[in-house]
Image (cartoon, rainbow, N blue to C red):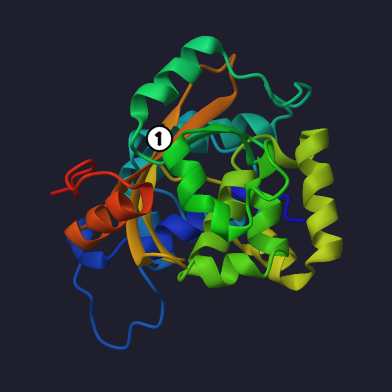
């Protein structure tokens, strides 16, 4: 398993920034996606050699000033900046969640919030990817997928990689698998005994499709995106999802799905037996 999370994160963000986004010409014969190391080093005011050591994990203790300069040069979002500083602390042996058990109890207030999110498909998950509670709309959406076959809690992380039905249900399965690994690695990861145990289990049962991602994808939980699902009753669905983090004491988040287009909104209404207009498409 990779122990160079900060290096993976810096490289992935460097490769995601286009030269135009930072005012640089693309130029001919650009073989590197995003920025070259030399370009980022110049923008951040560090040497290419030092940036190389950071990305390769040979130097894991950059100063706060260097991290700030890199974050500015990479145009990191606020959540990405926080994650970068957390990785720096982890590199110095600080793991605030390393000994805490994942919370499987959902507070009554959170259940009340979940109830008020109906008719949107929504669920509460913890850092292991366990679905702890959900709306009836989420249950109606996901029951044919096999995720909820054994009831709750249901482990979404394990489902993505070990249930063949996941590859049929999620039309962009490879992208989902990437995001699932990134989310699993977003916390203490190897210093979290239960997360490490789940990762070790998947390394054995799944093999390279899981371990290659662990080695190459930096840990970072995305806040939103689009899922394309193939539902046996209503066909293809495009669902915009949002991750709503609860308090640190809860160590949980709510995942809310909304129709990304009018055909999906109509399909969800049919699926749930609602009159048209129960859920409106975004935009």
Mark 1 lies on a secondary structure that is helix
Count of numbered labels shown in the rendering: 1
Q: Quadrant of residue 113?
A: top left
Q: Position of residue 126 (x, y in %)?
A: 62, 32
> Looking at the image, which residue is at 52% across and 52% down?
142
Q: Quadrant of residue 118?
A: top left
- Residue 65 appearing in the image: no
Of residues 250 and 82, the one nearer the viewer is: 250
136 on left or right of 60: left
Of residues 269 and 108, the one nearer the viewer is: 269
Q: Is residue 35 above or below residue 251?
A: below
> Looking at the image, which residue is at 62% across and 29% down?
89
Q: Is residue 29 above or below residue 171?
A: below
View extreme (bottom): residue: 29
Of residues 98 and 92, the one nearer the viewer is: 98
56 on left or right of 17: right
Give the labeled residue for mark 1.
Answer: 79
Q: Quadrant of residue 69?
A: top left
Q: Is residue 86 above or below residue 30?
A: above
Q: Position of residue 19 (x, y in %)?
A: 25, 66
> Looking at the image, which residue is at 62% across and 63% down?
216
Q: Position of residue 37 (x, y in %)?
A: 44, 64
Q: Position of residue 212 (x, y in %)?
A: 69, 68
Q: Which quadrant: the N terminus?
A: bottom right
Q: Is residue 187 above or below residue 247?
A: below
């Amino acid at each position: 398993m990779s122990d160079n999370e900060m290096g993976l994160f810096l490289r992935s963000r460097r490769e995601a920034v286009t030269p135009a986004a930072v005012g640089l010409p693309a130029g001919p014969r650009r073989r590197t996606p995003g920025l070259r190391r030399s370009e980022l080093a110049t923008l951040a005011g560090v040497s290419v050699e030092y940036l190389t050591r950071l990305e390769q994990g040979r130097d894991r203790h950059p100063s706060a000033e260097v991290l700030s300069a890199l974050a500015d040069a990479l145009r990191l979002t606020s959540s990405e900046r926080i994650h970068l500083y957390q990785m720096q602390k982890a590199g110095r042996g600080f793991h605030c969640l390393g000994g805490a058990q994942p919370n499987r109890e959902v507070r009554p207030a959170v259940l009340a919030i979940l109830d008020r999110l109906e008719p949107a498909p929504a669920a509460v998950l913890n850092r292991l990817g366990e679905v702890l509670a959900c709306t009836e709309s989420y249950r109606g959406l996901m029951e044919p997928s096999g995720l909820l076959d054994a009831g709750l809690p249901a482990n979404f992380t394990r489902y993505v990689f070990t249930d063949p039905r996941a590859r049929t249900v999620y039309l962009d399965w490879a992208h989902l698998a990437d995001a699932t690994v990134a989310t699993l690695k977003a916390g203490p990861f190897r210093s979290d005994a239960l997360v490490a145990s789940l990762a070790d289990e998947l390394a054995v049962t799944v093999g390279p499709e899981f371990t290659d991602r662990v080695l190459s994808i930096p840990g970072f939980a995305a806040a939103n995106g689009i899922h394309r699902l193939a539902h046996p009753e209503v066909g293809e669905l495009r669902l915009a999802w949002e991750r709503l983090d609860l308090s640190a004491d809860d160590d949980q988040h709510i995942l809310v799905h909304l129709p990304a287009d009018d055909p999906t909104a109509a399909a969800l209404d049919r699926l749930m037996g609602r009159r048209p207009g129960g859920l409106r498409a975004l935009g």
